[in-house]
Amino acid sequence: MNSSDVIAVCSVFIAVLALLTTIWQAYLSRKHNMLSARPCVEIYGQLLTSSPISIKLTNEGFGPAIINKITLIRGKDKVVVGSENDLRFLLSDLYHPNPEFNFHYFVAQDNHVLGAGKELELVKFPGTDIDKLHYENVIRILTDFEIEYQCLYGKKYTVKWSKSARS
């Protein structure tokens, strides 16, 4: 091998090392970006008698959460909330003659985005801070919630809320 062959082999070797280093750096960069943009969704239940019962969804992470599915669970029954009619499962046993005590709710459309630091009220029951019987009825029929969401990179997560675990 003459000197020009040695120089050529060394050049190829250095180019391959540079390529491997670039690939490794791109991998580490993507991994860091995934952690930096990761959502952290939590479900909070306000069950005190001093204010209306409500269930809220908050994103305490650094990136947006894409809500894929909201599921209501009562016993062995599960209902995926896709329309207003699906909430009848939650409230089939609840009626109050005062129209001001009607519940407020949120039905997520496909791939609803919850931004970082944002809050979303899933359901609220006005009047539970005023009417003790209404409060007891709402607590009795309140179901468990399961939220499936994903990050911008497509990684899926699930968070659950149960009144029995919080009470």
Image (cartoon, rainbow, N blue to C red):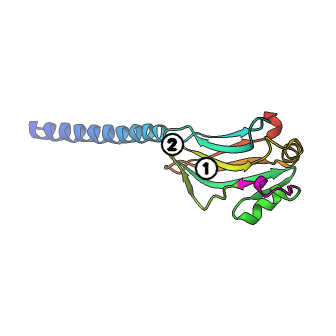
Instruction: Tell me the kind of residue under disc 1.
Output: Tyr
Q: Is residue 98 magenta?
A: yes
Q: Is residue 164 above or below residue 74?
A: above
Total label count? 2
Q: Is residue 17 magenta?
A: no
Give the x, y percent position of residue 46.
73, 38
Instruction: Tell me the kind of residue under disc 2.
Output: Ala
Q: For residue 116, which numbered disc appears in the image?
A: 2
Seen as rendered, the residue at the extreme left is 3
**Neighbour tally class for label 1: few under 14, some 14-19, many 20 plus, Cα within 10 Å:** many
Nearest the camera: 148 or 108?
108
Give the x, y percent position of residue 105.
70, 55
Q: Is residue 14 above or below residue 144?
A: above
Q: Earlier in the sequence, mark 2 or mark 1?
A: 2
Nearest the camera: 55 or 76?
55
Drawn side of residue 72 relative to residue 150, left or right: right
Q: For residue 124, which numbered disc appears in the image?
A: none
Res. 23 image quadrant: top left
Q: Element under label 1?
A: strand
Give the x, y percent position of residue 108.
63, 58
Cα–Cα span, label 2 and label 1: 13 Å
Res. 119 image quadrant: top right
Which residue position holds label 1? Answer: 149
Provide the major secondary structure of the magenta segment. Answer: loop
Q: Element under label 2?
A: loop
Range drawn in magenta: 94-104
Question: Which quadrant of the rendered structure holds the N terminus?
Answer: top left
Res. 91 image quadrant: bottom right
Question: Which quadrant of the rendered structure holds the C terminus?
Answer: top right
Observer-side mark, 2 or 1, equals 2
